[in-house]
Amino acid sequence: MRGVSFRVAARVFLDENRFDDFDEIHSDFEDRIKTVGRIDGILAVIYTERGDRNRIISARGATKREEAQYYEQFY
């Protein structure tokens, strides 16, 4: 997961200020959602919903654009 452990990536869902974007490009076979939130820095986590659970597909540090989007919601 690009240097982010599963345990850390799962914590992004605890950030009340996180935001989600539907990933149209990669949702051919299943709906994929990108959530960006702050844990130990700003993370981007791609996941899909499986029943009542979220299955994490990938996690990485957020890009500069994603970081800016995260902080813009506070202004």
Image: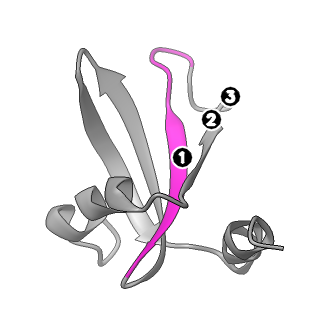
Q: Residues within 10 Å of mark 1 (few under 14, many from 20)?
A: some
Quadrant of residue 64 within the rendered picture: bottom right
Are the two marked residues, 3 and 1, in contact with CB atoms closer than 8 angstroms?
no
Q: Position of residue 52 (x, y in %)?
A: 23, 20
Residue identified by numbered label 3: 24
Are the two marked residues, 1 and 2, in contact with CB atoms closer than 8 angstroms?
yes
- Label 1, label 2: how many angstroms apart (C-alpha)? 6 Å
Q: Which residue lies at the image location 62% right of the left edge and 35% below the top edge?
A: 23
Q: Residues within 10 Å of mark 2 (few under 14, many from 20)?
A: some
Q: Secondary structure at mark 1?
A: strand
In the image, 16: left or right of 24?
Answer: left
Q: Position of residue 6 (x, y in %)?
A: 19, 61
Q: Residues within 10 Å of mark 3 (few under 14, many from 20)?
A: few
Residue identified by numbered label 2: 23
Q: Secondary structure at mark 2?
A: loop
Q: Which residue lies at the image location 50% right of the left edge and 21% below the top edge?
A: 31
Amino acid type, callout 2: Asp
* Most distant residue in the bottom direction: 41
Foreground residue among 28 and 60: 60
Range shown magenta: 28-39
Amino acid type, callout 3: Glu
Residue identified by numbered label 1: 34
Q: Magenta includes 35?
A: yes
Are the two marked residues, 3 and 2, in contact with CB atoms closer than 8 angstroms?
yes
- Label 3, label 2: how many angstroms apart (C-alpha)? 4 Å
The mark lying in front, picked from 3 and 1, is 1
Q: Position of residue 67 (x, y in %)?
A: 67, 76
